[in-house]
Image (cartoon, rainbow, N blue to C red):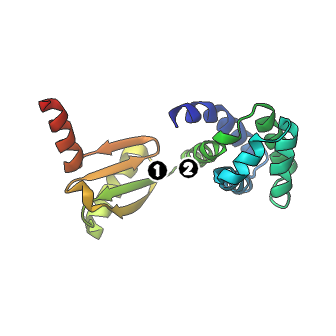
Amino acid sequence: MAENLTVARPYAQATFEIALEENNLSGWQTMLEAMSVACKDQYFMDSLKLAPNPSVAADSLISLLKDILSESGKNFVKVIGENNRFEVIPEIFEEFVRLREKHEKRLECDLISARAFSDSEIESLKDKLAKKFNCEVFLNQKIDKTLIGGAVLKIGDKVIDASVKTSLQNLTSTLR
């Protein structure tokens, strides 16, 4: 996954810059999301890999998404095909969303905890994150009882793990 993200970043940056030039961030996000969904399907990915050449594989994806893709989107698929990078499209989409959120001064975070946080605790955390990152914060709360206590905060590709589960695992490995 880390290797895919390394490969995906330049593509995401390029598509983001094109989307800004075209004043079409939403359109590009929709196109990339559709491509991402298609490329997450194992049967479809197998068919792309079995294509006789990259041009045929790119044409398959273009044909599947013909009602969604703009001319720029079709050119993007052709470049991805020429470089045989279909497997990184989901990461390109995720990175594009991150770049868009940064551009629009929005930040989406996941808070995973063993118990539900109160509304006041959520608001306090959102306020602190908004001040730290100078943006509007959207917080998704998820409950995971296996954490035992504490919480895990995912902010883009950063993870702050203050869970009891991880602390116990670290202690166990230290004692071995």
Q: Can residue 168 be seen in this view?
A: yes
Residue contact between numbered discs 2 and 1, judged by CB atoms under 8 Å? yes
Q: On the image, numbered disc 2 is attached to which residue?
A: 101
Q: In which quarter of the image is residue 75?
A: top right
Q: Earlier in the sequence, mark 2 or mark 1?
A: 2
Residue furthest toward the bottom? 119
Residue drawn at x 56%, y 35% as measured from the top left: 5
Label 2 environment density (alpha carbons within 10 Å; few <14, some 14–19, many ≥20): some
Q: Position of residue 28 (x, y in %)?
A: 73, 51
Q: Work out whether 93 lies above or below 1.
A: below
Q: Is 54 on the left-hand or right-hand side of 11?
A: right
SS of the residue at dot 1? loop
Q: Where is residue 15 in the image (x, y as percent from the top left)?
A: 72, 41
In front here: 128 or 6? 6
SS of the residue at dot 2? helix
Q: Work out whether 134 lies above or below 118.
A: above
Residue drawn at x 46%, y 50% as measured from the top left: 135
Q: Work out whether 17 lies above or below 149.
A: above
Q: On the image, numbered disc 1 is attached to which residue?
A: 135
In front here: 27 or 127? 27
Residue drawn at x 68%, y 35% as measured from the top left: 11
Q: Is 28 on the left-hand or right-hand side of 8?
A: right
Q: Can residue 25 be seen in this view?
A: no
